[in-house]
């Protein structure tokens, strides 16, 4: 039975820019037990079978987003995926599609990070003094947090971009990661930068190029649901173009500044030094 | 930079619409929507050529054209175009609703096992597709048996 197999064959896609002109597959036999992850298997290969195998990893607990890869034709975080999930003695591992391959399983995520930066992924406000030197918290109700909280769990692993069919055929498409984060900040009641962000999202390669395949949300290992965020972003853009949308000011600081009594003056020392 | 220049491009391209890995239904509806859209566009172009260019050539050419188009191949093609119209129109209605966040609910804190908004509403999507399939079967039956 595959569940009790003690050895699994890893078919790993290899590519060394210094040596190879073509991609090729290489097989390794890896011992497994219950709980062995894909990342454990790759580390075993690197430590025992072929030290030239390149892949990216860091936290080993699904937080850093480094080890996204295509495992048996589906994008996964390697550290977050156990071998026994596949009920197979053969595991095929390839780099994430739609991102340039640096070497073997390591892909270049810089294009995605650049697109992420382009949508201004930070709180934009007009009270620059308070932003530079915060004195209090910004007031936010639980419902207002829930409006964006789900989308703030993004770890920028690139799995959504690799799953997206539009990203597959349009290299300039902002992609589910950046557009999802665009909505995350626009939906934040502390933010006042929706107008400038929506201008970026409302471009030829922006939100309207998403046709709701839903693969990004399906594959997201953190439950972020970028497809949902993009549809909400489209609604926001449509409402804004019709003159609607949020009219109230962004959240104020809390507790609000109040007039305080002047401090009691400390009397001068009576004893001379 | 030199190092970056060596990175191997890995975009799936338009092939990525068709080969989608082990994904669920909506990923394939995306492809079906595009394919049916292209089919309808091609039909529209051919239909325009037929009813303008060939129609203007005179009675004999027009009779020959319509005679030629009565071949079983074109009859099957016409049924496929009708199928494409129904699928594209009804899936398009689903997309219009969902692309504005309608029927998708509200954002929720992700709790494992994660469920995205589309999957939460997949039951409704399946129901809509069942209605589409029934309509198509009725149309096909009417076409084959009823001689419509």
Image (cartoon, rainbow, N blue to C red):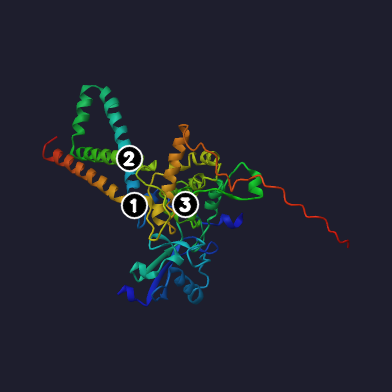
> Mark 1 belongs to which subunit?
B
* Residue A246 coordinates in the image, percent (x, y): 49, 38
Q: Quadrant of residue A126?
A: top right
Q: Quick check: B47 left or right of A125?
A: left
| Residue drawn at (52%, 38%) of the image | A248
Q: How many numbered marks appear?
A: 3
Q: Quick check: B86 left or right of A138?
A: left
Q: Are marks 3 and 1 on the same chain?
A: no
Q: Mark 2 — residue?
A: B92
Q: Quadrant of residue B85?
A: top left
| Residue drawn at (52%, 70%) of the image | A52
Q: Nearer the viewer, mark 3 or mark 2?
A: 3
> Mark 3 belongs to which subunit?
A
User: What secondary structure is found at the residue carrying circle 3?
Assistant: helix
| Residue drawn at (57%, 54%) of the image | B5
Assess disc 3: are there few (<14), some (14-19) or many (≥20) residues with their C-alpha within 10 Å of its C-alpha: many
Above or below, comparing residue A209 to residue A225 in the picture: above
Q: Mark 1 — residue?
A: B120
Above or below, comparing residue A19 to residue A160 in the picture: below
| Residue drawn at (40%, 73%) of the image | A35
* Residue B47 coordinates in the image, percent (x, y): 28, 31
Q: Are marks 2 and 1 on the same chain?
A: yes
Above or below, comparing residue B85 to residue A164 in the picture: above
* Residue A211 coordinates in the image, percent (x, y): 39, 44
> Mark 2 belongs to which subunit?
B
User: What secondary structure is found at the residue carrying circle 2?
Assistant: helix
Q: Mark 3 — residue?
A: A151
* Residue A221 coordinates in the image, percent (x, y): 43, 59
Q: Quick check: A171 left or right of A264?
A: left
User: What secondary structure is found at the residue carrying circle 1?
Assistant: helix
Query: What distance separates the C-alpha of mark 2 from that of mark 1?
Result: 19 Å
> Which numbered disc, 2 or 1, marks the residue that appears first in the sequence?
2
């Amino acid at each position: 039975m595959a569940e009790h197999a003690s050895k699994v064959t890893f078919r790993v896609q290899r590519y060394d820019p210094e040596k190879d002109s073509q991609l090729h597959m290489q097989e390794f036999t890896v011992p497994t037990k219950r709980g062995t992850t894909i990342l454990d298997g790759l580390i075993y290969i690197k430590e025992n079978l072929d030290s030239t195998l390149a892949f990216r990893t860091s936290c080993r607990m699904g937080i850093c987003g480094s080890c996204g890869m295509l495992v048996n034709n589906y994008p996964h975080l390697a550290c977050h995926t156990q071998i026994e999930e596949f009920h197979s003695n053969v595991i095929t591992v390839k780099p994430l599609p739609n991102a340039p391959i640096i070497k073997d399983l390591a892909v270049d995520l810089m294009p995605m990070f650049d697109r992420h930066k382009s949508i201004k992924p930070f709180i934009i406000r007009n009270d620059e003094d308070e932003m530079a030197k915060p004195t209090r918290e910004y007031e936010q109700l639980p419902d207002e947090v829930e409006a964006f909280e789900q989308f703030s769990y993004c770890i920028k692993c690139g799995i959504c971009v690799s799953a997206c069919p539009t990203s597959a055929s349009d290299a300039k498409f902002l992609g589910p990661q950046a557009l999802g984060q665009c909505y995350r900040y626009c939906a934040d009641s502390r933010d006042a930068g929706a107008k400038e962000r929506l201008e970026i999202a409302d471009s030829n390669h922006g939100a309207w190029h998403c046709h709701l395949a839903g693969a990004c949300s399906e594959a997201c290992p953190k439950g972020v649901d970028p497809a949902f965020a993009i549809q909400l972003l489209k609604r926001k853009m449509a409402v804004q173009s019709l003159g609607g949308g949020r009219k109230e000011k962004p959240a104020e600081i809390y507790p609000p500044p109040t007039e305080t009594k002047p401090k009691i003056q400390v009397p001068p020392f009576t004893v001379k030094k | 930079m030199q190092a970056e220049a060596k990175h191997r491009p890995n975009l799936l391209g338009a092939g990525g619409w068709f080969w989608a890995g082990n994904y669920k239904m909506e990923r394939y509806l995306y492809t079906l929507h595009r394919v049916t859209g292209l089919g309808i566009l091609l039909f529209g172009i051919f239909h325009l050529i037929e009813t303008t260019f060939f129609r203007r050539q005179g009675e004999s050419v027009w009779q020959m054209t319509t005679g030629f188009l009565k071949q079983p191949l074109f009859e099957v093609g016409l049924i496929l175009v009708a199928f494409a119209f129904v699928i594209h129109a009804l899936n398009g209605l689903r997309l219009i609703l969902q692309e504005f966040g309608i029927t998708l609910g509200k954002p929720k804190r992700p709790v494992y096992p994660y469920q995205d908004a589309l999957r939460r509403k997949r039951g409704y999507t399946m129901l809509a597709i069942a209605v589409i399939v029934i309509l198509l079967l009725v149309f096909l039956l009417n076409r084959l048996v009823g001689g419509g």
